[in-house]
Image: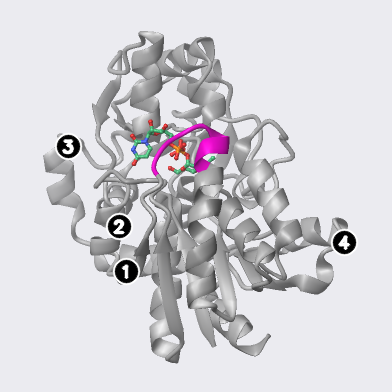
Amino acid sequence: VKILSVVGARPQFVKLAPVAAACATAGVEHVIVHTGQHYDELLSDVFFSTLQIPTPDVQLGIGSGSHAEQTGAMLTALEPVLLTHSPDWVLVYGDTNSTLAAALAAVKVHLPVAHLEAGLRSFNRRMPEEHNRVLTDHTADLLLAPTDVAASHLAREGLAERTVVVGDVMTDVLHQVAAAVTGAGPELLERFRMTARGFSVATLHRAENTDDPARLAAIIDGLAAVDHPVLLLAHPRLRAKAAEHGLRLDLGSVRVHEPLGYPDLVALVSQARGVITDSGGLQKEAFELRVPCTTVRTETEWVETVELGWNVLARPEEIAVAATRAQPAATEAAPYGDGHAAERVVEALAQT
Ligand code: UD1
């Protein structure tokens, strides 16, 4: 079996890492295509090097643009690549414009599509990620769901027959990396001048939070009012939008830093008192590391983290209180699988 993975944005590189390793172990031919949606060293290259992901076979170099420009350019560039490689499966990841473009390009040239992280729903039809995941799920031939909740969404949409629950591949890689970085904490704390459990790690990048000046200003005020230092790992979209709206990020408790590579992020979050974010991946990473998370959104796809008490949804003015809440009750629950999801992905593709 020959698998062709299409990736383009930071969380997709994290998801690709365990899949590429599982393909290598199983002796499966694997072609990697990078759309170029994320092109900064800190959002792209550093993930390939630190997670030992093979260099992409094809770089499309699409870059930024409006949704239509970005998605359209990817569609056009992907078509000849898919025809040349003619894989048994086109594997697409998550919910970005790269995901939708690849699924659509593949189905139009009659190549089977598998969607990894299928069935997640925010039920917020204003989010670009929600359009991307709903459309991709309904385009794909095989839906690789991370959880039973995700599979239940697919069943409700009439897609049960194409669905396999495999677990969450981000949890595979998180546990491998967390084991490898135990001991890295003290050096990192010194580098950031933080004390163990004395700071929060924050990230923000979603259009719903960054693009409206009033909302972004309220979120920055919320972070600034936290009673301990907040290390804000600023995504380029956040920096660009703050500059555009004339807003300063480094107010009150906030210390601004550039994005971190994955092992550093995991080591730092392991030492943190809390996480404040709008990232899907980070909500789960905080849960797996048992660090309380405050999610600056009105809904989450990773509902298990909220149900188990480790994540709360907060409005901007609620951030400061939420970020200082007491540690939740311990839990042994493992809703995101056993760390072998990527092996199940490759098995499912090899069998079907
Ligand atoms: C994208 C995904 C989002 C995912 C996120 C992870 C879509 C619609 N959104 O959001 O689901 O959670 O990636 O980071 O696909 N930019 C740079 N350098 C880069 C990349 C982007 O400076 O390497 C800037 C550009 O100004 C660009 C802006 O960031 O216009 C937004 O980038 P884009 O790829 O459109 O979306 P993200 O916000 O990164």
| Residue numbers of the magenta segment | 63-70
Asked whether the viewer can see residue 343, the reply is no
Q: Amino acid at mark 4?
A: Gly
Q: CA distance from mark 3 to mark 4?
A: 49 Å
- From the image, tell me which residue sits under label 4: 158
Q: Secondary structure at mark 4?
A: loop
Numbered tag placed on residue 47 in the rendering: 2
- From the image, tell me which residue sits under label 1: 53
Q: Amino acid at mark 3?
A: Phe
Badge 1 vs badge 3, beta-carbon distance below 8 Å: no
| Residue located 17% across and 37% down the image | 192
Which quarter shows the N terminus? bottom right
Q: CA distance from mark 1 to mark 3?
A: 27 Å
Numbered tag placed on residue 69 in the rendering: none
Badge 4 vs badge 2, beta-carbon distance below 8 Å: no
Q: Amino acid at mark 1?
A: Ile
Which quarter shows the C terminus? bottom right
Q: Secondary structure at mark 3?
A: helix
Tell me, yes or no, whether the highlighted magenta stretch contains residue 301: no
Q: CA distance from mark 2 to mark 3?
A: 21 Å
Q: Amino acid at mark 2?
A: Phe
State which tag comes first along the sequence, 1 or 4.
1
